Image (cartoon, helix red, strand yellow):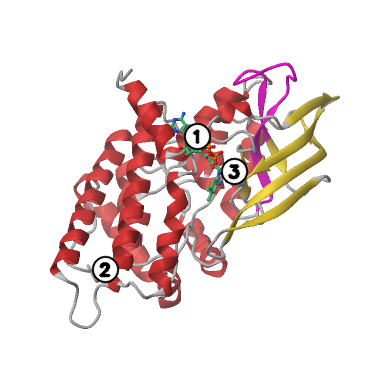
Amino acid sequence: MDGGFGITPSGTSGEVDRAFRGAVDAFLEEALSEDLRAAGRATTGLKSSPEACAVWRDKLRARGWLAPSWPVEHGGAGWSTAQRLYFENASALRDAPLLQSSGIRTIGPLIIAEGTLEQKLRYLPAILSGRHEWCQGFSEPQAGSDLSAVSLRAEREGDDFILTGSKLWTSFAQYATHMFLLARCDPGSTGGDGLVFLLVEMNRPGIKVNPIRFIDGEYETNEVFFDRVRTPAADRIGEIGGGWKTAKRLMAIARSNNTTTGMLRRALRAAERGATGPGGAAPSLRARLGQLAMRIDMFEALEVHAGAGRISIDDAPATSVLKVMATELHQAITEAGIEAAPDTDFAQAKYFATRAATIYSGTSEVHRNIIARAIGCP
Ligand SMILES: Cc1cc2nc3c(=O)[nH]c(=O)nc-3n(C[C@H](O)[C@H](O)[C@H](O)COP(=O)(O)OP(=O)(O)OC[C@H]3O[C@@H](n4cnc5c(N)ncnc54)[C@H](O)[C@@H]3O)c2cc1C
């Protein structure tokens, strides 16, 4: 295994037993073909190519390791945070494709924690098989950092809600079969009152997805319009009027695994590769890459301490700390990647792909406010 500048894999190695490490290492060595590793190395954004993701997802699912944090009874691996991190690091070191599934990372854990039995049976197997892809419909033109200002209308008609309005910046809506969203079901309400958290099929009549293209040409986010979209009222999580509580729980889950050590180590490996041209890297760059590796180890120790990625995260400020640290570190790594290989499209694409990370899932400024309040700052 190529360890770059000799920077080693994982601060968590000591926390998982030898048998577990051996099983993970053996599986990865055997399952990761050279094609899959090449796809992993070529990844610039949040996901590897759809083809590589499909092959890798099937292999992980067959082994029972596709959803590391989900309980075994729901088709997950049931791993502890330390075990999950070992697996992620071992995968990153072998350039495994990057799978970023909103179903596995965010809505799946929420359904496990708070969904009805019927929702668990309908949605969890479909997430694992790849039949359902989810997107998140929270932000709107007038509701970003101030999310409780959402105004997408949900009017009750018999057993259904009728949705009218729009969502903005919805990542990967163009591929999604389902959206979880926050809508206002009490027209006279303001703020976090009078909201409902709904699970909506994207193929319902009246839904329109318009692309938003980034300055670098990438297409990831969308505007989504709802023109009297009928959707069952029963397909919600939590109480009608209590959607804000559910949304806060979803956001805590999403923040706790927004940017993982596996992603950080992949980015660092890419920067290290860029720095190994003729003559090798300048000493100052080597030192910088070494410091970044130490920051990843520190972040990983914090992830283990906070139990990151668990189904049940009740310490919201801790998830804000994880989100701010990981996304800012990711940006610092891709900045070093540019220094290592300034003229390559690859380093530039990776750099641009991490710029928005300190905006989505709540901006760094907003999370610093949450942290400040939690530690008693005025
Ligand atoms: C690439 C990308 C993908 C996204 N994907 C999704 C998605 O899939 N689903 C979804 O629902 N949303 C998504 N978003 C939206 C994202 O969550 C919002 O952009 C974010 O919450 C900020 O909201 P805003 O853009 O309205 O900015 P604003 O809230 O208008 O903020 C503008 C600036 O003011 C600062 N600011 C605002 N309030 C405060 C405050 N109280 N204190 C200090 N500073 C403050 C902010 O930090 C920011 O710098 C995505 C965004 C991006 C860029």
Residue 92 in the figure: left or right of residue 290: right
For the C terminus, the quadrant is top left
- Residue drawn at point x = 47 percent, y = 41 percent: 70
Q: Residue tagged by mark 3?
A: 124
Q: Confirm whether residue 87 shows in the render.
A: no
**Place of residue 242 in the rendered image (x, y in percent of width and height, measured from the top left):** 62, 20
Q: Tell me: residue 89, above or below residue 151.
A: below
Under mark 2, the amino acid is: Glu
- The foreground one among 136 and 274 is 274
Provide the residue designation for mark 2.
272
The residue tagged with tag 3: helix, strand or loop? helix
Disc on res. 348: none
Q: Magenta stretch: give its range.
A: 176-198
Q: Please say whether residue 118 is one of the residues in the magenta stretch.
A: no
Q: Which comes sooner in the sequence, label 3 or label 2?
A: 3
Label 1 near ligand 1 (CB < 8 Å): no
Q: Secondary structure at mark 2?
A: helix
Mark 3 or 1, closer to the camera: 1
Task: Say whether residue 92 is left or right of residue 177.
Answer: left
**Going 25% across and 72% down the picture, which residue do you hit?**
275
Q: CA distance from mark 3 to mark 1?
A: 19 Å
Which element is circle 1 on?
helix
The residue that label 1 is drawn on is 251
